[in-house]
Amino acid sequence: MQLAMVGLGRMGASMARRLVAKGHDVVVYDVDPARAQTEAEGGATPATGLEDLVAKLEPPRAVWVMVPSGEATRTTLAKLAAVLESGDTVVDGGNSNYHDSQQVWEDFAQQGIGFIDAGVSGGVWGERDGYCLMVGGEEEAVRRLEPAFVDLATADGYAHVGPAGAGHYTKMVHNGIEYGLLQAYAEGFALLEAATELDLDLHQLAALWNHGSVVRSWLLELAEAALGKPEEFASVRGFVEDSGEGRWTVEEAVNRAVPAPVITASLFERFSSRDDERFAARIIAALRNQFGGHRLHTATPGEPAPDDGPSDAGS
């Protein structure tokens, strides 16, 4: 099928490449023309702007927005609403707040434009292995774009999870769980590292636990990979960012009176990481880089960590 990808950061570019590889006709646009040109060399059709992108699509059009959540997404969606037509469909694949997605769906519906919110997980490995897609929206709009969802996803890694907002709500909770899992691994490895008298090999243990252990997981495989490069890991700072979903998950837990002490504590631990260089925080920073390509802060310990702005879409 034909569709467009707006935003060619880590996630958007890899998703566009996977769609092209699966035989889809993909039109691409990014505020950095060089990124669009790079994808054009791989078979995508570059666009010079949103109007040009829309002109290159046959109606009913499908446009996937993969830019950082917040103002960047809101601005992009508003510009698309001004140039799209009734019958077209927009997918927001970033980590937007589900309340915003519900409002966008209502606004777009007044123009006859379909809106789908897609939670995307899989990080930088998704291009090769496939993504996990949590899709929210009306049945008709979702079914029309389903060929793209199926080809982007790993086997059994796509589901229409509910109405507008459901995709981003489930991705929010997914990322809250991720916070807790990362914190548990980080604290465990910090305990191992602290037992200096036992001279434990943390890389060996991560590899061992991935075979038959009840704590084996993809995150543990990534810990094994990170700990297997001691020279690189030695330069990793313990500064751990939070991209929004963890905070929203905690807010939802409070608003819905659902106890979530582990996720809440893991969020506060990320705040604490910005004041010291604890081993646990360095583990989380290394793991986030492994699965999502999130920036590593590798400055000399003691220097203030820079603020590199909003994270890339998805994770």
Image (cartoon, rainbow, N blue to C red):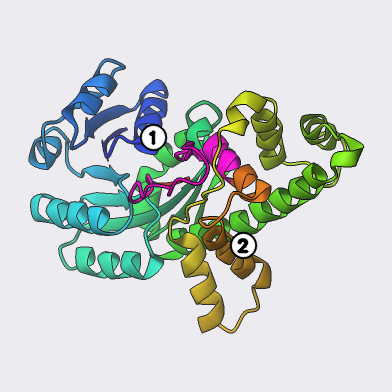
Give the Cα distance between marks 1 and 2: 25 Å
User: What residue does disc 2 label?
Assistant: 266
Q: Is residue 33 magenta?
A: no
Three-letter residue code for mark 1: Arg
- Indicate the secondary structure of the residue bearing disc 1: helix
Residue 96: which disc? none
Question: Considering depth in this image, is 70 or 202 the residue closer to the camera?
Answer: 202
Question: Considering depth in this image, is 170 or 240 the residue closer to the camera?
Answer: 240
Three-letter residue code for mark 2: Ser
Residue 234 placement, left or right of 209 = left
Residue 87 placement, left or right of 142 = left
Question: 10 Å neighbourhood of mark 1: few (<14), some, or many (≥20)?
Answer: some
Q: Where does the magenta region start and end?
A: 285-313
Residue 27 placement, left or right of 92 = left
Residue 10: which disc? 1
Does residue 171 appear anywhere in the picture?
Answer: yes
